[in-house]
Image (tube, helix red, strand yellow):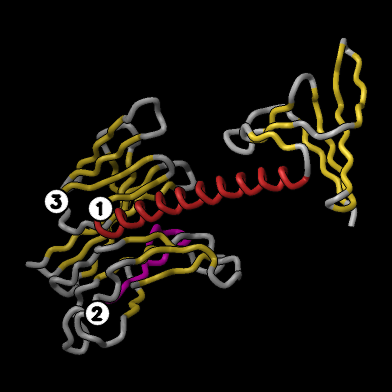
Amino acid sequence: MFCCWSVTFLFLSPYGTYVLFANVVECFFCFSAPSTEVATFKTSQNGVSKCVNGEVSCVCDNQIYNNLEDRQKCDEEISQYHLKELFEMMSIEKKKADEQLYASIKYHGRDIYYKIEDELIEVHTHSGRDRVSKYKFPTNPSRGFEIWKHSRGDLVGIFAFLDDDEQKAKLIVRLLKRYKVKYENVTLLENLNREAFSNFGHKIVLITFSDYRYKALLVSSPTSSWLDLPAVGHVEIFVHGKYTIFSKDSIYVRGNPVAFSYFGFNVEQVKDLNRDWIDGKRIE
C-alpha cells in the first residue's frame, strides 16, 4: 500500500507542534512499506527554492524523528494530548451539570447566572474582568429558573413562584435589560388549581418538539402527590404559541405511581439520542 502526506510549517499550535531544523520549509513523507521510505525537503536559500532528497530531520514536541516509527510515536503523543483535553472538557461539563442540578446556577454562553432569594445575579466572564449585573424581582421561593435569549436578541428570564398558603403557582416571564437593574414584565402564567408543597418550578428547562420552531417550557414539581401517594412528582409542559409567549394550559406528564420517587428532580435537554435530528429530554 502506498501513501503520502505533506506537512507545512506556517504556524505553531499548543500541541503537536512541528518545527524544522535550519531553513527547511516543508517535509514530504512518502513510503510504500515500513522498510522503504523516501523523504524530500523543500528548502529556501538565498531566495531560491530547491528540493533535497535525504533523511527526515524534524522535531515534534521537542522530539526528533527521522523515520516512520518515530513519527508514529509523535502521533501517539498528540493523541494523548487530545485525550487529556477531552477529559478536562468532560470534567468541566460535569461540574456545570452538578452546579445546575444542586444549586440555582445557569450557564448562558460565557455568562453565569445564579439566584439568591429575590435577586438574580449575572456575572459576565467574557470581559477582561468579571462584571456583575443584578436584577430584582418579587420574593421567589422556588429556586428553579431559566435564561433564554429571544430571537430579537433580548435576554428573557423565566422564574417560578409558589405560594403554599394560597395553593397558587405562577410562572413569571420577564424581559431583562442587560447591564441594567431594571426589567420589564412580559407575561405571567397562573393556574389556581395547584397542589401545595409540590415544589413547582424546582427545574425549568426550555425544550423543542420535533421541528416546531417555538420553544416550550418544561417545569417540574418533584414533590407533588398522585393517587394519594406522596412525592410521586410530575412535570408540566407549557407550549409556546404563535401569538402568545406560552399557553396557560399545561400538559401533565407524571412519573410511575411510586411513593417518594421525586419524578422531575432533574430535568434537562440532551443532544440527539436516536439520530432523528431532534434533541432528547431526560427526566429523573
Q: Amino acid at mark 3?
A: Thr
User: Which numbered mark, 3 or 2, is in the foreground of this view?
Assistant: 2
Q: Which residue is mark 1?
A: 104
Q: Amino acid at mark 2?
A: Ser
Q: Which residue is mark 3?
A: 139
Pointer 2: residues within 10 angstroms few (<14), some, or many (20+)? some
Q: Which residue is mark 2?
A: 261
The answer to which of marks 2 and 1 sits earlier in the sequence is: 1
Q: Quadrant of residue 129?
A: top left
Q: Quadrant of residue 263?
A: bottom left
User: Which SS does the magenta portion mostly show?
Assistant: loop
Q: Amino acid at mark 1?
A: Ser
Q: CA distance from mark 3 to mark 1?
A: 15 Å
The part of the chain drawn in magenta is 232-247
Q: CA distance from mark 3 to mark 2?
A: 29 Å
Residue 153 place in picture, x, y as percent:
46, 41
The answer to which of marks 3 and 1 sits earlier in the sequence is: 1
Residue 161, magenta (yes or no): no
